[in-house]
Amino acid sequence: MRINIIGAGLAGCEAALYLAKHGMPVTLYEQKPHTFSPAHHSAGFAELVCSNSLKAERLDSASGLLKAEMELLGSSLVPAARACSVPAGGALAVDRDKFSARVTQMVENQQGITVHREEVTELPTAGSDITLVASGPLTQGPLADAIAAVTGGAELSFYDAAAPIVTAQSLDMEQIFAASRYGRGTADYLNCPFDKEGYEAFYEALVTAERAPLHEFDGQLSVYEGCMPIEVMARRGADTMRYGPLRPVGLVNPATGHRPWANVQLRAENAEGTLYNLVGFQTNLKFGEQKRVFSMIPGLQHAEFARYGVMHRNTFLNSPRVLTAQLCLKERPDLFFAGQITGFEGYMESAACGLLAARAIAARVEGKPAPVYPRETMCGALLNYITSPSKDFQPMGANMGILPPLETRVRDKRQRYLMVAQRAVQAMQAALAQM
């Protein structure tokens, strides 16, 4: 049985190194330097495009916890990053060129890895071989067409226009009420009611907030009516949002007995109800501006943002519909996917996804049961997120909001996060011991 990996980014390299170190030869295909995506410029593997930061190191952070779990799972890239680190306070940042060169050397020198520098334009037909697609969020051209053909064209998205997501436990429920418009249904939405003065202050802050610049490879994104950035909508007039996503019709604020002047609705992002997205708030504001402006919404003054809104070019699968928890296609078990194309968003998240896919492939090859990761772990929670039914699936990075809450409430956020992280590490250790 042959194992082919398409793409030598973070996910592909992590997967190739894991499999080869465990005695499973792989063939790794990388299109550079013959063909470059619009964002890549170096011929090296594991090229970091947008930033050299791999985020926080401390265990009581989502990124720190993810790295700790990856080390338990046998990561090669986390130690490589630490070997190429540059001063960055509490974060793990790397010298990009040194990191890429180190990973390239690790892969090329690893016994069991055969590298082909060529562009892959088609996927193999179903058979006994295993293929892992780790071609990244800028997959385009014939390969994107081939992926669309095996997943169904509607299951591949090319633009990521997502609203912010906040944690449920950070909401001020004294200012928020649960209700559906006109009392229909089962009060599926949380409602954040504005009075006239509060709305006008929010409107002024929104229309003057600073937008994030588009990357060169994003191009000029067309503004569609269905996913218009909230700040663009606001600039059409002070009342435009009140007749759109902030319309208050069919709602009564139980605190006043009257209809709000405007109303922001929050919709559950996951079945557990630990995360909520801001309905209709697709945005291209800078992250700091999102925190400042959206915290003006009643009940969100102290909101913890599990992810900020984004609007950029991003090729990703509708993973809940097409992928299993082992990261292979439901209709093609020989075809695995890893990295940001699955909806794992972020550098380390991409590498973690490659590692999880490699471990699933290794179990398949060895005839062992597929690995299962506890929901209390960051890896398990991310896998659960991208493979659970979702009405409007969007990529997700590591964040504490996707983990199950503690049984007892801990008010201090730092202490709460530390306890959640310690629980995750213990759960991962126990799961690995059983595997």
Image (cartoon, grey):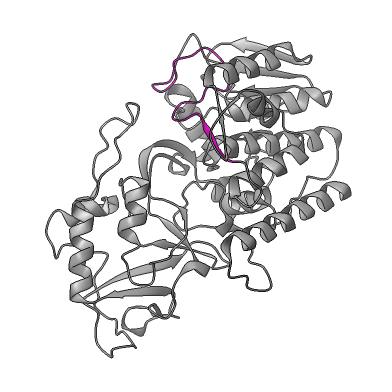
Q: Is residue 267 above or below residue 101?
A: below
Q: Residue at x 83, y 45 (%)?
A: 369
Residue 301 is situated, as x and y percent measured from the top left of the image, at 38, 67
Residue 50 drawn in magenta: yes
Determine the main secondary structure of the stretch shown in magenta: loop
Residue 247 drawn in magenta: no
Q: Residue furthest right?
A: 434
Q: Quadrant of residue 264?
A: bottom left
Residue 212 visible within the image: yes
Residue 203 is situated, as x and y percent measured from the top left of the image, at 20, 61
Residue 121 is situated, as x and y percent measured from the top left of the image, at 51, 19
Q: Residue at x 75, y 21 (%)?
A: 2
Q: Is residue 293 above or below residue 212?
A: below
Residue 207 is situated, as x and y percent measured from the top left of the image, at 19, 53
Residue 435 visible within the image: no
Taking the image as shown, residue 423 lies to the left or right of residue 305, namely: right
Taking the image as shown, residue 261 lies to the left or right of residue 412, namely: left
Q: Is residue 270 above or below residue 380?
A: below
Q: Residue furthest bottom?
A: 257
Give the residues in magenta.
36-56
Q: Quadrant of residue 26?
A: top right
Q: Residue at x 74, y 37 (%)?
A: 71
